[in-house]
Image: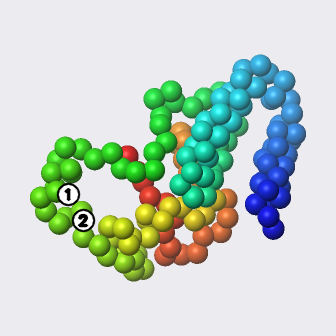
Amino acid sequence: MSETIKEFYDRERALSVVVRHKQQWSQPKKVSQLHSLMRWENEINTVLRQNGQQILYIYNDVDYTRRRRDFKYITANKWSAEAKACMTSMNCIRERRTCETKKYGSGGKCCSVDGRRYIVAIVRTETRGWGIFALEDIPPNVFVTEYIG
């Protein structure tokens, strides 16, 4: 299936949620929130596409929370001064290992640098705030995503 057709069907499924919760979308506050989350999703997906990675979705039907203004999606770690010193003076981070089951190592050959391979959504939950949820079955003992900060 071509990427365009797949994206069309993905959007169609996402919009079906809007139709099911029609009464909420007549509220200006909810519509404003939807636009905010769509802009946030588009900004993140632009970065992901530029890096050849799988896009993601953002969803909140719990409350009126929007994106955090101070949140910036990045695809590479921001190293502290201590970590930078470690990388240049020792081999603690520059060591290269290949992935093994339940052991992911570090360096350019690590599977985590290839990016996420599964479709996920950032979803607002009632009791835990924002979280990541898989939108497809993921086999056991495989790399899902890298936490970058």
Q: Would you identify the image quadrant in which residue 1 lies? A: bottom right
39 left or right of 89? right
Q: CA distance from mark 2 to mark 1?
A: 6 Å
**Helix, strand or loop at mark 1:** helix
Seen at 32% across and 76% down, the residue is: 97
Residue 125 position, x and y percent, is: 60, 42
Q: Quick check: can you spot residue 119? A: yes
- Which mark is drawn over residue 94? 2
Seen at 86% across and 33% down, the residue is: 22
132 left or right of 70? right
Are the residues at dot 2 and dot 1 in contact (C-beta closer than 8 Å)?
yes
Q: Which residue type carries mark 2?
A: Arg
As drawn, 149 above or below 89? above
Residue 18 position, x and y percent, is: 82, 39
Q: Residue furthest front?
A: 50
Q: Residue furthest left?
A: 89
Seen at 21% across and 51% down, the residue is: 83
Of the numbered discs 2 and 1, the one sitting upstream in the chain is 1
As drawn, 48 above or below 35? below
39 left or right of 8? left
38 left or right of 13? left
As drawn, 9 above or below 128? below
Which residue has dot 1 on it? 87
Q: Quick check: can you spot residue 124? A: no
Q: Residue furthest top?
A: 28
Mark 2 is surrounded, within 10 Å at the Cα level, by few (under 14), some (14 to 19) or many (20 or more) other residues, namely few
Q: Which residue type carries mark 1?
A: Met
**Helix, strand or loop at mark 2:** loop
Residue 56 position, x and y percent, is: 63, 51
Residue 28 position, x and y percent, is: 77, 19
Taking depth in this image into account, of 104 and 131 the one nearest to the observer is: 104
